[in-house]
Image (tube, rainbow, N blue to C red):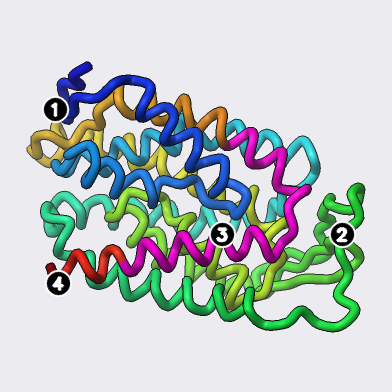
């Protein structure tokens, strides 16, 4: 089958199966899997035009709601965290998308930067996984995965999970998500691939509690990005910026199933196992981009 916008020729089951497998694993860590789908589209399918970015965002828009629904249903959404992520990333993703159109038509131009950022995050997360757990560290009981907000104001947000109190500076989180929004908008991943490991490795938040919030943030910012790219031609006079709707829908359908499955399985998986998988994925992607920049 030939997809007219991208020019990709592939059996339709391939993008569906790829998205299903990737999102099932990555959604446990609060990541949609778009950061893996992007190199898959570029390197495997040969989709190299700027339209690959809005197509990646379209995948997020279709795929993520099923996973968010599952986290909400099981009371594992930290709503204050979600709100701050949205406030920071939405303006950033518009700026990043504009930068992608005007200044980054060739992905090689930001491979070095993205590779360095992801390598730093992946390394910190790997060190966290390799560090021995504190003696007597509690494991959440099967019914203890619900979160409860304790404080949310302009200075700080705090919540309770598994009998422990966790918190983060609201201004620091806002600044982080604003910067990541710009990167995510240009890269076509919504920012969750960077926000999730940052929250776990640097701010020390439990991975079981941040997944729903980062996925929701990624979904909303991707909606903004798809709309921006769809309107860029009449507003900015740019061509070839609409997503490949059919290819993106196939990726999204596979991701929709994978997100729900991953969110359902997450509470059965140990935190260190999820963190290890996230560290491996982020570090591997970072190395691929650093090597690709110099070759």
Residue 173 part of the magenta segment: no
Where is mark 2, residue-wise?
140
Residue 294, numbered label: 4
The residue located at (43%, 56%) in the rendering is: 191
Residue 277, numbered label: 3
The residue located at (34%, 29%) in the rendering is: 248
Q: Secondary structure at mark 4?
A: helix
Q: CA distance from mark 1 to mark 2?
A: 48 Å
Q: Decide which of tag 3 and tag 2 comes sooner along the chain.
A: 2
Horizontal and vertical percent for residue 183? 33, 61
Horizontal and vertical percent for residue 144? 89, 53
Q: CA distance from mark 3 to mark 2?
A: 20 Å
Using the image as rendered, state which of residue 271 and residue 80 is in the foreground.
Answer: 271
| Magenta-tinted stretch | 259-287
Q: Decide which of tag 3 and tag 4 comes sooner along the chain.
A: 3
Where is mark 1, residue-wise?
7
Q: CA distance from mark 4 to mark 1?
A: 27 Å
- How packed mark 3 is, by other alpha carbons closer than 10 Å (few <14, some 14-19, many 20 or more), is some
- Give the vertical position of 216 relative to 247 (above or below): below
Q: Is residue 119 left or right of residue 254?
A: left
Q: Secondary structure at mark 2?
A: loop
């Amino acid at each position: 089958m030939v997809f007219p916008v991208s020019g990709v020729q592939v059996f339709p089951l391939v993008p569906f199966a790829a998205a299903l497998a990737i999102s099932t694993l990555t959604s446990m860590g609060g990541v949609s899997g778009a950061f893996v789908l992007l190199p898959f589209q570029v390197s495997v399918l040969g989709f190299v035009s700027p339209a690959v970015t809005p197509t990646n965002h379209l995948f997020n828009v279709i795929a993520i709601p099923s996973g968010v629904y599952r986290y909400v249903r099981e009371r594992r959404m930290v709503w204050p965290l979600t709100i701050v992520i949205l406030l920071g990333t939405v303006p950033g993703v518009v700026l990043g998308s504009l930068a992608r159109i005007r200044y980054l038509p060739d992905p090689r131009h930001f491979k070095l930067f993205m590779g360095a950022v992801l390598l730093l995050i992946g390394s910190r997360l790997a060190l966290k996984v390799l560090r021995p757990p504190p003696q007597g560290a509690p494991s959440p009981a099967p019914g203890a995965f619900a979160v409860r907000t304790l404080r949310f104001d302009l200075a700080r947000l705090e919540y309770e999970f598994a009998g422990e109190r966790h918190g983060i500076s609201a201004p620091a989180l806002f600044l982080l998500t604003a910067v990541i929004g710009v990167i995510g908008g240009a890269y076509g991943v919504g920012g969750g691939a960077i926000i999730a490991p940052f929250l776990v490795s640097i701010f020390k938040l439990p991975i079981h509690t941040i997944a729903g919030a980062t996925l929701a943030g990624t979904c909303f910012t991707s909606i903004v990005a798809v709309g921006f790219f769809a309107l860029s031609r009449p507003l900015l006079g740019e061509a070839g910026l609409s997503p490949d709707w059919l290819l993106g829908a196939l990726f999204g359908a596979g991701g929709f199933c994978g997100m729900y499955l991953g969110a359902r399985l997450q509470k059965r998986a140990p935190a260190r196992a999820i963190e290890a998988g996230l560290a491996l994925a982020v570090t591997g992607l970072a190395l691929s981009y650093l090597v690709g920049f110099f070759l």
